[in-house]
Image (tube, rainbow, N blue to C red):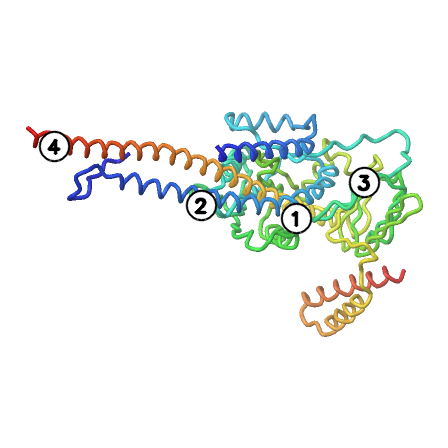
Amino acid sequence: MRREDAPLGVRSISTQIVRNRMKSVKNIQKITKAMKMVAASKLRAIQVKAENSRGLWQPFTALLGDTPTVDAKKNVIVTISSDKGLCGGINSTAVKISKSLHKLNSGPDKENKYVILGEKAKAILVRDSKKDIELIITELQKNPLNYTQVSVLADDILKNVEFDALRIIYSKFHSVVSFLPTMATVLSPELVEREAESGGKLGELDSYEIEGGETKGEILQNLAEFQFSCVMFNAVLENACSEQGARMSAMDSSSRNAGEMLDRLTLTYNRTRQASITTELIEIISGASALEG
Amino acid sequence: MFRQASRLLARASAVTRSRAFSSQVPAAPAVDSTFVESWKKVNPNMEPPKTPSVYMTPRPQTPTSIPSKLTVNFVLPYASELSAKEVDMVIVPASTGQMGVLPGHVPTIAELKPGVLSVHDGNDTKKYFVSSGFAFIHANSVADIIAVEAVPIDQIDPSLVQKGLAEFNQKLSSATTDLEKAEAQIGVDVHSALNSALTG
């Protein structure tokens, strides 16, 4: 605790300083408790949507498999983060994973670019990887999230960024206290063809008949774009849930912390108060005994 | 004392909530080991991110004989209409025409056009109007239908369909730029499909 000079003209020990601290800590506790309630209600609303959208990407993974180790020349890392802070560590883990992926996929004639969704990731990545950033999108949650908005966003990214493989990094909402960083991969149609020919996970793709459209290439193009928008939709919803959940637990621990601090301050306050009363008594009694003789 | 009680209650409810989600992650996750290894080389101190296949229940293997029922997963962005439902037949509106899918169908990737999707199970049929999407039919008699928007046919209002059709026809005739023409054409296609869905 800081030592401050007592106000002039006061002879007893002042409890003003401690009282001021107690008032501000109590206010902080109230604010963080309110923020926790707000985050809890927002979480409830968006959790329903996120769970309903979980079936959306599963057919694509069942058809095209999950290929995190695909060898792609042009990698685009789509990092999804939140706009507002005070949500625990999810944004910093997302950025750390993006940077590690960048290092993992670096090599001769391989390039890695970032597409950033959310202010928090932008703040960190702009500092050291500015030249690798292709697109920055913020204020995603101004209007409630819906599929149309996300598909327009996906369309934007597909039009403006050249890619062989898109890697989407988000925090999947596992439960209110656990958020798992996840990486989803979407391949461009040319890469899908190449992997299908070379065998491996996509080897069975050739056995599928193609109905509709002019050529196989056109269908694969539509498929890749549709897959990207579906995966993005789910990723954005899951990340929003994780953000609210992380904020809930951060604010909860913050209000608990404030409560403990308040307890300690109350003890100090009482001690200070009693000490000042004792000092006054001693003065009075010694003054009285001095008068008597 | 009451502060502790509320905190304990909140923790207890969080625990039950987390237990409810444990069924989401399957018992044996299919982790890609080459990815994990290459990750450890770059970043040994951090856990590698999970990949979506970990969160999925693995699909059944291709059976040797043709199964009797078709398993259908019909998903929309807002809901999973049907998940792992066993039916006899589905008719999907592929862009090359209505396509009937029975168990043992050849593996197919079909692009869908606006039309009617009907699910036949025994004697009852459920019909949905589907805006567009994709249908995958796998070798193990699992059909995945992903649509952007789908409504059951009985929830469509015929008068609104007629009004929409007239409106888009008018827009098409008065369209100037290619973009406007394309948008109006899409509107006409969807509304005429709706019309034929209601009448047919």
Please tell me whether mark 3 or mark 1 is closer to you in this view: 1
User: Marks 2 and 3, how far apart in space?
Assistant: 57 Å
The chain that hosts pointer 3 is: A
Q: Are marks 1 and 4 on the same chain?
A: yes
Q: Residue at x 74, y 31 (%)?
A: B58
- Quadrant location of residue B30? top right
Q: Are marks 2 and 1 on the same chain?
A: yes
Q: Identify residue for label 3.
A: A208
Q: Residues within 10 Å of mark 2 (few under 14, many from 20)?
A: some
Do the numbered discs 3 and 1 sit on residues whose CB atoms are within 8 Å? no
Please tell me whether mark 1 or mark 4 is closer to you in this view: 4
Q: Identify residue for label 2.
A: A31
Q: Are marks 2 and 3 on the same chain?
A: yes
Task: Identify the amino acid type marked 2.
Answer: Ile
Residue A226, image x, y percentages = 69, 48
> Element at badge 4?
helix
Name the quarter where the C terminus of chain A is drawn: top left
Q: Identify residue for label 1.
A: A229
Q: Residues within 10 Å of mark 3 (few under 14, many from 20)?
A: some
Would you say B99 lies left or right of A225 here? right
Task: Identify the amino acid type marked 1.
Answer: Ser
Residue B19, image x, y percentages = 65, 31
Q: Earlier in the sequence, mark 2 or mark 1?
A: 2
Q: Identify residue for label 4.
A: A288
Residue A198, image x, y percentages = 72, 33
Q: Nearest the camera: A43 or B194?
A: A43
- Quadrant location of residue A205? top right
The chain that hosts pointer 1 is: A
